[in-house]
Image (tube, grey):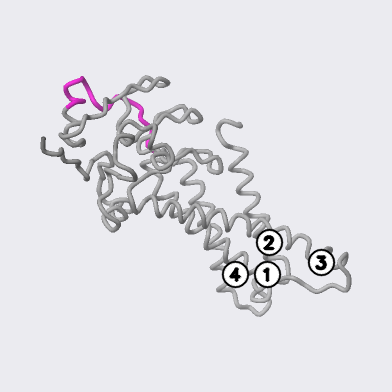
């Protein structure tokens, strides 16, 4: 139960719906709209919350790009594939076999000890979704963060609209205690979601992953590059187009910046 992430996903779902229920039951803008018979805004907010939950489960349960078989057969094939992706003027990094699952790792893949698999274009293992973020679900992870942030910011506005005055502090806490708790939860998650969304959009715009950004000094195909050089960077617009385009397959291992040898 713990390893499959059941408790984490159940906790996320419970927290989401309890917070939503508090916002609907207190004297907030949502409740006032309902009482006036104006159902458009409450329905839109409810739809946004449902979308965020569905995207959460989609990203959480999606295959992030697990490497399940050796995709490159033989040493010769390996060298040919590497030569097509790595500059001829530099020493191609040797395709290594994973020490855990014993499969040949493509470039930009990394073994996740939590998921017990190598993941293509590995970004990070996210404990909140209890899944890796990689080649197949990274773009959907960013879409989820965007929808979640919109829902949280709207919930923040709704929560602030519902506080009732009290004659004493004790009475005020009795009237607004649950709403205050919801406000604190929504506020904290709004900050986290905004920071994560900003970081991942920046990394997508330079065609880099969190793992590569944080550990480039330990990665064979990056540690010999010049300072802050990214061999996979095609430019801001091309990177974002490749990242969010779902109508074609992108070769994430393709190198675009090639070093030239200085003349002797």
At horizontal 28% and vertical 25% (from top left) the residue drawn is 95
Residue 99, quarter of the rendered image: top left
Residue that label 4 marks = 42
At horizontal 65% and vertical 49% (from top left) the residue drawn is 14
Indicate whether 6 appears above or below 203.
Answer: above
Q: In screen coordinates, is 108 left or right of 193? A: left
Give the percent coordinates (x, y) of residue 141: 45, 49
Give the percent coordinates (x, y) of residue 7: 62, 38
Q: CA distance from mark 4 to mark 3?
A: 22 Å
Give the percent coordinates (x, y) of residue 59: 46, 45
> Which marked residue is nearer to the observer: mark 4 or mark 2?
2
Magenta residues, as a range? Answer: 65-79
At horizontal 57% and vertical 72% (from top left) the residue drawn is 41
Q: CA distance from mark 2 to mark 3?
A: 14 Å
Q: CA distance from mark 1 to mark 4?
A: 16 Å
Q: In screen coordinates, is 154 left or right of 102? A: right
Residue that label 1 marks = 160
Which is more N-terminal, label 1 or label 2?
1
Q: CA distance from mark 2 to mark 1?
A: 7 Å
Is label 1 in a helix, a strand or a loop? helix
Which is more N-terminal, label 4 or label 1?
4
Mark 1 is surrounded, within 10 Å at the Cα level, by few (under 14), some (14 to 19) or many (20 or more) other residues, namely: some
Give the percent coordinates (x, y) of residue 229: 30, 45
Mark 2 is surrounded, within 10 Å at the Cα level, by few (under 14), some (14 to 19) or many (20 or more) other residues, namely: many
């Amino acid at each position: 139960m713990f390893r499959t992430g059941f408790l984490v996903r159940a906790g996320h779902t419970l927290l989401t719906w309890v917070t939503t229920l508090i916002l609907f039951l207190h004297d907030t803008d949502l409740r006032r709209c309902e009482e006036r018979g104006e159902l458009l805004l409450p329905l839109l907010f409810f739809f946004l919350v449902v979308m965020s939950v569905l995207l959460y489960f989609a990203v959480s349960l999606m295959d992030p790009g697990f490497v399940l078989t050796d995709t490159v057969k033989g040493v010769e094939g390996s060298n040919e594939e590497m030569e097509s992706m790595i500059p001829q003027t530099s020493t191609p990094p040797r395709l290594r076999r994973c020490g855990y699952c014993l499969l040949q790792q493509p470039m930009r893949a990394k073994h996740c000890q939590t998921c017990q698999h190598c993941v293509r274009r590995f970004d990070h293992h996210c404990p909140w979704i209890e899944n890796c973020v990689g080649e197949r679900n990274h773009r959907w992870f960013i879409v989820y963060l965007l929808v979640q942030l919109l829902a949280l910011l709207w919930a923040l506005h709704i929560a602030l609209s519902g506080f009732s005055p009290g004659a004493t502090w004790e009475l005020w806490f009795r009237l607004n205690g649950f709403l205050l708790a919801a406000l604190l939860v929504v506020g904290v998650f709004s900050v986290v979601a905004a920071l994560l969304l900003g970081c991942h959009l920046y990394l997508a715009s330079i065609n880099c992953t969190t793992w590569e950004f944080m550990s480039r000094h330990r990665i064979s195909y990056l540690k010999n590059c010049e300072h802050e050089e990214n061999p996979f960077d095609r430019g801001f617009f091309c990177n974002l187009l490749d990242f969010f385009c779902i109508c074609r397959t992108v070769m994430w291992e393709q190198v675009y910046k090639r070093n030239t040898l200085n003349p002797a």
